[in-house]
Amino acid sequence: MVFDTLAETLDIVMLHRWHPGDKHSLKNDTTAAELINRLYAELFAGNDSIIDQIVSPDYFSHTEPSEIDRESLKTSCAEFFRPLRCLRREVLLTMNDGSRGLVVHRYAGDVAATGEPVSIRSADIYEVRDGLLCEHWGVYKYEEV
């Protein structure tokens, strides 16, 4: 799914009508957004084993039909990172609502084969249960560089 503006992104996010979850679904007072940021920080550092540590075995994505468990998430991440190099991540916005977190971020780097710059803006929502990321909604847009 692609979005054009942050306002449009938040409109899409609100379509899911967030319902505050029980606080006991998070462990050690870690917020959902902190868990999401940890996932992406580790993935950008090349550590996909983080998926086994903080993603539920019952994980699935509402917007990426191929992501139905941990292994398919690892495959999806590998396919995303494969053509890119020197990728950096900037967090633009984080929000928490009970057991759900939202992170809006921008990735910048270049295409490995051509050296052309690339910039991607993304918004990701995750539901956390029992301290693990279990459901995902996401939107992204390639930005002009």
Image (tube, rainbow, N blue to C red):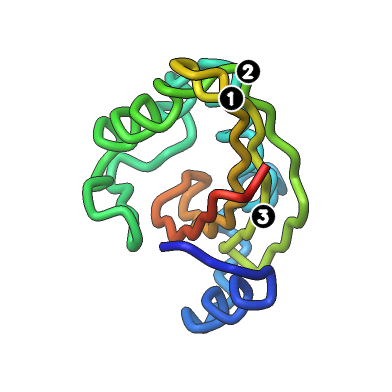
Earlier sequence position, callout 3 versus callout 1:
3
CB atoms at circles 3 and 1 under 8 Å apart? Answer: no
Of tags 3 and 1, the one toward the viewer is 1
Q: Position of residue 106 (x, y in %)?
A: 67, 44
Q: Is residue 85 above or below residue 11?
A: above
Q: Position of residue 127 (x, y in %)?
A: 49, 59
Which amino acid lies under the numbered mark 2 shown in the image of this protein?
A: Cys
Q: Position of residue 45 (x, y in %)?
A: 60, 17
CB atoms at circles 1 and 2 under 8 Å apart? Answer: yes
Q: Nearer the viewer, residue 140 or 45?
A: 140
Q: Quadrant of the C terminus?
A: top right
Q: Is residue 1 above or below residue 27?
A: below
Which residue is pictured at 62% across the width and 59% down the height?
Answer: 101
Assign a secondary structure to mark 1. Answer: strand
Which amino acid lies under the numbered mark 3 shown in the image of this protein?
A: Val
Question: Mark 2 highlights which residue?
Answer: 86
Callout 3 environment at 10 Å: few (<14), some (14 to 19), or many (20+)? Answer: many
Question: Mark 3 highlights which residue?
Answer: 104
Question: Mark 1 highlights which residue?
Answer: 110
Which residue is pictured at 48% across the width and 35% down the height?
Answer: 54
Which residue is pictured at 63% across the width and 63% down the height?
Answer: 23
